[in-house]
Image (cartoon, rainbow, N blue to C red):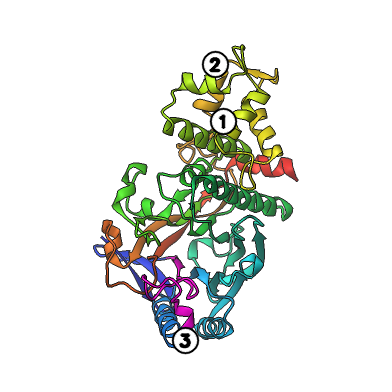
Amino acid sequence: MRRISRIGSHVVASSIQENQQQPCITCTTFNILAPIYKRLNHEDQSCLESDYRAYWLARNHRILDWLLYERSSIICLQEFWVGNEELVNLYEKRLGDAGYISFKLGRTNNRGDGLLIAVQKENFKVVNYKELHFNDCADRVAQLLHVELVFPFSQYQNSEIRQEILIVNTHLLFPHDSSLCLVRLNQVYKILQYVESYQKENQLKPLPIMLCGDWNGSKRGHIYKFLRSQGFVSSYDTAHHYTDADAHKWVSHRNHRGNICAVDFIWLLNPDKYRKFLKASWSEAVFGMFKYLLRRASLTETDAFALLKADNQDCITYPGFCEALRQLNLTGHCHGLSVEETKDLWIQADIDGNGVLDFKEFLHQIWNPTGSDQRDDNNNENMDDNQEQTIGFSVKNAVLFPPEVEKGRWPEDYSLSDHARLTVAFSPIRMPCSQMISQQCLRAL
């Protein structure tokens, strides 16, 4: 059993059985439920908290009380009410007085809410801050913060080991219907593309990446599988030794439909992880969605191949492929795949470039794609002593509040938000750079 505690200004994770405390940084992600969305009367949908200053002001003071009591090194908030100057000033003042530097970003088209990311100035030096606008149907955005660790860790002093992190804060679209699942997958793809481009443009060698936020998707969904294919791990699941089969063991959100689910994650990618090429992972994720839709219609692989085939032919052609995507509602509307994305998928499937797919190719490239996953789980054991070293993180602990959600229950007396607060403690460790990623970065420069 672990707890998260604080000594001075440093947050540490410690085992109750351990006497020594190891210095850590912590990260908190929390969807604080913007007052413009919080309903005070479920029978009257127009009765919103934003119309009652005393209510939203008191609730946000309580949120800040909790955040400042925990004093996480990194704070990522979603549904931050950027449209209200008084609330913005409240957060900026209280966080600033507590030693944080913060950045806010509103959703496009003046939606009213947005994101806030804050880091402790005593722990980090801000190297760069960037904003990403998805420009999609839901006006979603993301923040990218590049920071350098400045608090001392004895094993890194007087060394040339990089002590930098890329932190992303985002809030994905809620999947109101199945056609929007593709939009959410595209949003994550754009985030990873943006991070990859930022690393190349700034000639950055591999460094830890943390993706924080409300992902509006569970461990059973396509987003989860896509991020896993890129080497990211769910820090909460890592801390509790949960596998992909343990999706039912915790929740973090009760949505407007009354359903409880786990949607809030802090994803970690360490620089020693081998990753697939991004476009290959994206294609596999879309084909996974394609397969899910066909299976939901009770189609076998043979039925699916027949759907894709052109008339009187024993193979799949590009027109037949496009028509099948249209029938599955993956194209033909503003939220669907673009012409370029459809062509990219076909190129990934038609690897020999002959313009058609037979049944064997269909099974290998679309139905059960194996991809080019070159990660080596034992690469740490076979390191070259001369391999370049960098900083990474081990997950020491992770807790959700309120505590009932860690048992898969939602407490009726919890009113701080419709999301739980997730805090994770990370311990910096020395590790090698991934050769595969390094080579990819160098080729792109």
Q: For this view, does 389 lie left or right of residue 34? A: right
Give the label, 2 or 3, closer to the camera.
3
Please tell me the numbered disc located at residue 414.
Answer: none
Q: Earlier in the sequence, mark 3 or mark 1?
A: 3
- Establish if 352 lies above or below 85: above
Where is mark 2, residue-wise? 359
**Residue 27 part of the magenta segment:** yes
Residue ID for mark 1: 372
Which residue range is magenta in the image?
24-51
Residue picked out by circle 3: 53
* 238 or 211, nearer to the observer: 211
Answer with the quarter of the image where residue 158 lies: bottom right
- Compare marks 2 and 3 and give the one earlier in the sequence: 3
Q: Looking at the image, is mark 2 or mark 1 nearer the viewer?
A: 2
Can residue 37 be found in the magenta stretch? yes
- Residue 204 can be seen in this image: no
Where disc 3 sits, the SS reads: helix
